[in-house]
Image (spheres, rainbow, N blue to C red):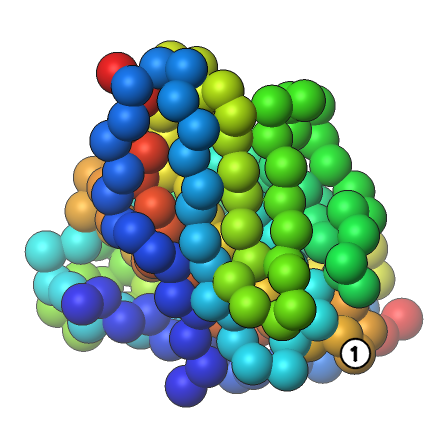
Amino acid sequence: QQKVQQSPESLTVSEGAMASLNCTFSDGTSNNFRWYRQHSAKGLEVLVSIFSDGEKEEGRFTAHLNRANLHVSLHIREPQPSDSAVYLCAVSYGNEKITFGAGTKLTIKP
Amino acid sequence: GPKVLQIPSHQIIDMGQMVTLNCDPVSNHLYFYWYKQILGQQMEFLVNFYNGKVMEKSKLFKDQFSVERPDGSYFTLKIQPTALEDSAVYFCASSSGQGAPNERLFFGHGTKLSVL
């Protein structure tokens, strides 16, 4: 069964410095990767979706995918305190059988 | 690592019937969530639950939906009666009580509900 692991578990970064989050997965046939963040007790906000190797940018959020290395990362440019949240990596084949990582708790210090 | 188990992985029922989706959260977690994802669409929040009570729910959490966790057993989502538009994958998640909601969420693998 697919295993998705995120690192680090928690990360503190100063405002304006690049924040980098990592996600590894076990199923090399996976082709659908999303980064979400959870601000509050309810919403999951999708940040960026990526489906092929390389880079995908959505505003200040950039995902890098390397399927050969079973690795997808998220980089946040010029993070603000309002970016403090839990960031979740979601991996699937198509839209079936989505597996989530446990999340990285990101704190942005002013 | 900690795991959230969802039972069953796939459920097929006829429209109008009742269905109960079961979630075995991470032990010692106190906050529980249900999310719904219709095939090809984004994940959407349904409800969160703490200390025996619904804390927040979305507009997707219709009157036909209910949640409970009797005596620390499974955290359940019941739909009665079901409708065709309830067909989706339902994800359960749990988190620890410390500092929630901004704590790491542990998700189950989902229960695919097919309403015929």
Q: Is residue B15 left or right of residue A9?
A: left
Looking at the image, is A48 positioned above or below residue B73? Answer: above
**Direction from residue A9 to residue B30 in the image, left or right:** right
Residue at left offset 63%, top offset 37%: B66
Q: Residues within 10 Å of mark 1 (few under 14, many from 20)?
A: few
| Quadrant, the N terminus of chain B | bottom left
Left or right: residue B85 compared with residue B99:
left
Query: Which three-letter amino acid code belongs to the residue tagged 1?
Result: Gln
- Whether residue A51 is visible, yes or no, is no
The residue pinned by badge 1 equals B98
> At 51% across and 30% down in the image, what residue appears?
B79
- A68 or B5: nearer the eye? B5
Element at label 1? loop
Q: Which image quadrant is residue B77 in?
A: top right
Residue A73: name its quadrant.
bottom left
Q: Residue at x 33, y 64 (%)?
A: A72
Q: Is residue B28 above or below residue B103?
A: below
Please report, as a chain letter, where disc 1 is located: B
Along the line of sight, which residue is nearer the eye, A16 or A80?
Answer: A80
* Residue B38 place in picture, x, y as percent: 39, 27
